[in-house]
Image (spheres, rainbow, N blue to C red):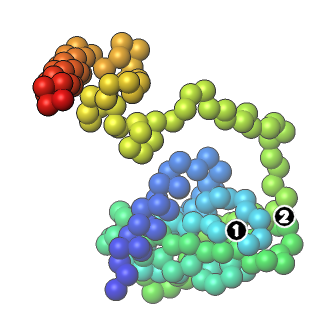
């Protein structure tokens, strides 16, 4: 079964319903409550449906605005919500469409609404473009400064203060060993000539 993706979708729907300021809720006389998020959607958009008050673990939400019924699943008992998703039909006229929920063996008619609008109003501002202010330290180039000391003649930058005292001492020690090796080799060449 695909319970993992279904659980992730239910968790995402729950988070969206909690955070969405435009969610609309209607309460029926029998205590079943439905919430559609977003409460106003364009044709072709996806909406999340949350139903509170059903005693079972499954159900369905139906609306003339939906392409297909939203299959609802969730926890056991009336204290836990049922979650599902639906797609708004294309070709719908702007307007308000009722939502009916089927759970606990019967229909809860017209307990919620979804408003369909073709053109959503958008704020009249342009986003500020993001401009990088410094090069990005990525890949081996950014981590190499901390992995090994710099070779003589190779500049590395690890911060404003440089690599620090331990790396400086290691670098000086390696330079001294290299200088001694060059001196020993040069003296051997002179002796052999």
Q: Is residue 185 visible?
A: no
Q: What residue is rendered at 62% in x and 80% in y?
A: 62
Q: Which residue is mark 1?
A: 45
> How many numbered marks appear?
2
Q: Disc number at residue 118?
A: 2
SS at mark 1 in the image: loop
Q: In what quadrant of the picture does the N terminus appear?
A: bottom left
In the image shown, does 117 or 168 lie closer to the viewer? 168
x and y percent of residue 59 in the render?
Answer: 47, 80
**What residue is drawn where x is 22% and y is 17%?**
172
Name the side, left or right, on which 106 lies relative to 141: right
Q: Nearer the viewer, residue 2 or 132?
A: 132
Relative placement, left or right, of 33 versus 132 is left
Residue at 42% across / 80% down in the picture?
58
Instruction: Give percent across and percent down for residue 111.
Output: 61, 69
Is 193 situated above or below 83? above
The local secondary structure at tag 2 comes to loop
Q: Nearer the viewer, residue 86 or 8?
A: 8
Residue visible at 85% across and 58% down in the picture? 119
Give residue 53's position: percent from left, percent from top: 44, 67
Location of the C terminus by quadrant is top left
Which is nearer the N-term, disc 2 or disc 1? 1
Above or below: residue 145 compared with residue 104: above
């Amino acid at each position: 079964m695909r319970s993992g993706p279904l659980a992730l979708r239910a968790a995402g729907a729950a988070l969206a319903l909690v955070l969405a300021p435009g969610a609309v809720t209607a309460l029926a006389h029998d205590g079943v409550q439905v919430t559609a998020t977003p409460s106003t959607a364009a044709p072709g958009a996806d909406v999340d449906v949350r139903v509170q008050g059903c005693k079972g673990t499954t159900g369905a939400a139906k609306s003339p605005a939906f392409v297909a019924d939203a299959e609802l699943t969730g926890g056991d008992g009336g204290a836990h919500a049922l979650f599902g998703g639906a797609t708004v039909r294309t070709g719908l006229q702007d307007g308000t469409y009722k939502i009916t929920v089927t759970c606990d063996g019967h229909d809860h008619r017209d307990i919620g609404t979804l408003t369909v609008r073709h053109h959503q109003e958008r704020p009249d501002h342009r986003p500020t473009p993001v401009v990088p202010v410094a090069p990005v330290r990525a890949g081996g180039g950014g981590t190499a400064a901390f992995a090994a000391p710099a070779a003589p003649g190779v500049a590395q930058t690890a911060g404003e203060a440089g690599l620090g005292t331990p790396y400086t001492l290691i670098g000086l020690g390696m330079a001294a060993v290299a200088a001694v090796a060059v001196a020993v080799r040069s003296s051997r060449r002179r002796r052999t000539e």
